Image (cartoon, coloured by chain):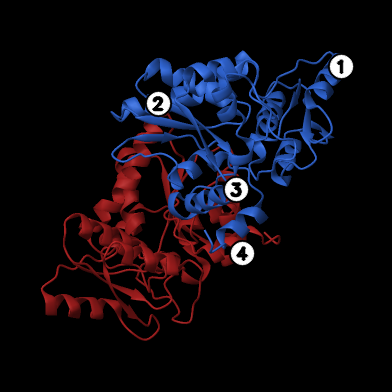
Chain colours: A red, B blue
Amino acid sequence: VVAWSSGNHAQGLAAAAAIVNTHATIVMPYDTPQIKIARTKRSGAEIVFYDRAHECREEIGYSLATRSGAVVVPPYDDYDVMAGQGTCGLELQQQCAAAGITLDALLIPCGGGGLAAGAGTAMQALSPQTRLYAVEPAEFNDHERSLLAGDRLQNDSAATSICDALLAPSPGELTFPINARNLTGVLTATDDEVRAAIQFAALELKLVVEPGGAIALAALHAKKLDIKGQRIGLILSGGNIDATLLSTILTDHSQ
Amino acid sequence: VVAWSSGNHAQGLAAAAAIVNTHATIVMPYDTPQIKIARTKRSGAEIVFYDRAHECREEIGYSLATRSGAVVVPPYDDYDVMAGQGTCGLELQQQCAAAGITLDALLIPCGGGGLAAGAGTAMQALSPQTRLYAVEPAEFNDHERSLLAGDRLQNDSAATSICDALLAPSPGELTFPINARNLTGVLTATDDEVRAAIQFAALELKLVVEPGGAIALAALHAKKLDIKGQRIGLILSGGNIDATLLSTILTDHSQ
């Protein structure tokens, strides 16, 4: 298999490939956090690095796959991958149902939009009264702008964010129509708000969450949504944060 | 209510007192981690500090209770408290049963022995084939020595450990006979092994665990028990670690 990924899809695919005893090649940006590189390698995958600003990972991935005859597993813009990500919404809803809880809203981290499309679709089918919000980094608010425009818009190529998992250049071709139909809205959070959420998660929830995984919590923590008296679901979609960054955030008293 | 506690029992009692709208006074050592002091205060409890090396917390607690007519809720040497701590073993066993798992062994953090007595009794009743191990800090191995001696022995008053939650001076009067009957053995872990376990928990399990809460994991991680081919349960009994200590441990490359 061949995939491109900022690191979490990479690890999943590398682990899956190891289980079924096949070879995985992952195209990852040079600035991927060390922990994600180490974990992807640990599962035996081969990594091909690329420059996020000047190279196209899809091109590199399809070119590698064509040469080797490998199957391409994209990180989000693929119905099977969305369906897999949908199991997160399915499990969440099953657990809520078992606890007798109906969520008023669900906040879902959003880069390319695959998790939002998959988990949102599952939630919509099983709990149609639950409002769905995608949450993006403030400078990567392509879904927010695209939904307003009714068309897929790009992020500024100079935009930055510590949310390495959420840096897709634009909403996915396949994910966007699904999200446009399902989402009540889009929230955003700044890097500082994400740092505050990571600190809160560690010290209050006792959970280690990576920047992209903490963005839904960040929006809630920064009061981007009026949730008074409501039951809110949050997806915390990853904990692969470099130890040094987590260490710095933990002792940052400005949060 | 009046209680003495290194910090976790304190927080629980302070929170419970706030719920039932009563006053809680907690006797805590001067060297309690800041996070535990802050959380106990946050719930509205009054804190009376004492010197662990030179004062007796039981005396201070009973004296305060006698003057005010308050109820004393000791941290471990009490059947009701042990029964409460036993719910941890009960829930663990229910979850194992639901998953179709029978544990070969369960490792339980041990200071005064209340959690070991309570959780161990629940596990013994529901899963008698599961071996039970208490796990202590290396310099606070009073249970290990007491079980060998068949009598409750004291820890060296000069002993130190980063496991602030597990620094009871000796096995409890009520907990010891229960643990003596239930336990297969006692394991210990050094401070360095505990640090390594905290780092492992954060980076691999994505869980923030305090030193005392990590000691069972530390024993396993340091290979103190041969677990090849076995199903092992671990109780991680607390996540109230000061941010600065966690930050230091995260970036300690000697682990």
Letter of the chain that mark 4 sits on in the rendering:
A
How far apart are the alpha carbons under marks 2 and 4?
41 Å
The disc labelled 3 sits on which kind of residue?
A: Asp
Query: What crowding class fits label 4: few (fewer than 14 Cα within 10 Å), some (14-19), or many (20 or more)?
Result: some
- Measuring 54% from the left and 62% from the top, which residue is drawn there? B254
Residue A67 figure quarter: bottom left
Residue with the mark numbered 1 = B68
- Measuring 53% from the left and 64% from the top, which residue is drawn there? B253
Query: What crowding class fits label 3: few (fewer than 14 Cα within 10 Å), some (14-19), or many (20 or more)?
Result: some
How far apart are the alpha carbons under marks 2 and 3?
25 Å
- Measuring 51% from the left and 49% from the top, which residue is drawn there? B197
- Viewer-proximal residue, B211 or A195? B211
Q: Secondary structure at mark 3?
A: helix
Mark closer to the chain start, 1 or 2: 1
Query: Is residue B112 toward the left or the right of residue A148 in the image?
Result: right
The disc labelled 4 sits on which kind of residue?
A: Thr
The disc labelled 1 sits on which kind of residue?
A: Ser
**Which numbered dot is residue A248?**
4
How far apart are the alpha carbons under marks 1 and 3?
39 Å
Q: Secondary structure at mark 1?
A: helix
The tally of labels here is: 4
Residue with the mark numbered 3 = B191
The location of residue B255, given as percent across then percent down, is 52, 58
The disc labelled 2 sits on which kind of residue?
A: Arg
Residue B223 figure quarter: top left
Quarter of the image with the N terminus of chain B in it? top right
